[in-house]
Amino acid sequence: MQNDFMIECGDGKLIAATHFGREGKPTVIISAATGAQRSYYGRFAQSLVEQGFQVVTFDYRGIGDSTTKMNDPSASMTNWGELDLTAVINWVAKNGNNPQIFLVGHSVGGQIFPLARNKSLVRAAYFIASQTASRYYWTGPQKLSVMLLWNLILPTTTTLTGKLPNWAYGGKYDLPKGVAIEWATWGRHKNGVLQDDNNRLRAFKEVNIPLRFISIADDKLLAPKDAVEQLYHQYGSLNKEHHHWYPSDFGKRKIGHFGFFRKENSEMWDDVHLWLKRYV
């Protein structure tokens, strides 16, 4: 079963969501990568349903079907966590008919999870290619690329166009200006999402649930191993693990930042299935 619907956030904004499976099962929320639409995770969501879960995917404000206007001033990465993810968790808690809630975060999904005001309702979280945005954890030519993005490409394109065009950051969809500017702010700061904000530091340290981080060896531009490890260390949980995968581990030539969720790599999904079932 699959159903599209809208969820109202605390500030009145509506975000688009999709529910997979049947009520009463443990629920997995999928928190997407920057610029990715919820439809990208559909096959993966169906695999979780087959393993006995129900699943909710959603588009952050300013993305996909949650777009009202590109320059919506409320569209920011902070609001993706504090408002959007909070609203989704609330919806699941009220409508899922099962108190067991899990999170699978892709990329920025791991950065914004602690910002959700009701994160304590989540039992365990699995993060794929979730990294600090801080440029201090990139090396070689990839570091030059992110420095150019944060300091030249992003400021120039957002000033000229009022958004971050997809070609400017290598994504599939344009990003709202507020999202792009905050992303760059995190990227230029040594602490990434934490900035120098004691409240954010506290929010990360408060997370005390099982966590599993996966980094991908050929994902050097968007989520290199050191950047994933830094985000891993920012979380306070004592029950956490980080695994670094190589494409050759699965007989693949490449996986990259988005490859985990592609149908041809579905054998990797068993790791998520088995790990989540430990905590049901």
Image (cartoon, helix red, strand yellow):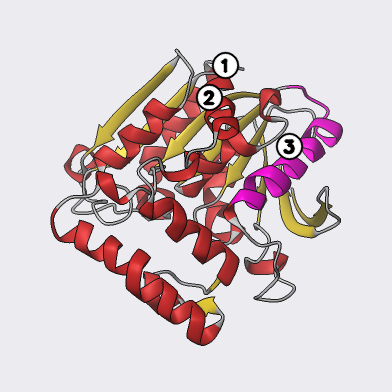
Which residue sits furthest left?
140
Q: Which residue is drawn at 48% across and 32% down?
A: 126
Observer able to see residue 157: yes
Q: Which amino acid, by three-letter code, is at mark 3? A: Ile
Q: Which amino acid does label 1 sit on?
A: Tyr
Kind of element beneath mark 3: helix
Residue extending farthest to the top is: 238
Classify mark 3: residues with Cα within 10 Å, few (<14), some (14-19) or many (20+): many
Measured from the top left, where is residue 233 in percent x and y? 37, 26
Q: Residue 89 carries which label?
A: 3
Left or right: residue 35 compared with residue 136: right
Report which residue position mark 1 lands on.
279
C-beta proximity under 8 Å, tags 2 and 1? yes
Q: Is residue 87 magenta?
A: yes
Indicate the secondary structure of the residue bearing disc 2: helix
**Residue type pointed to by label 2:** Leu
Q: Which residue is drawn at 44% across and 51% down?
A: 186
**Vertically, is 130 above or below 220?**
above
- The residue labelled by disc 2 is 276
- For the record, the magenta segment spans 78-99
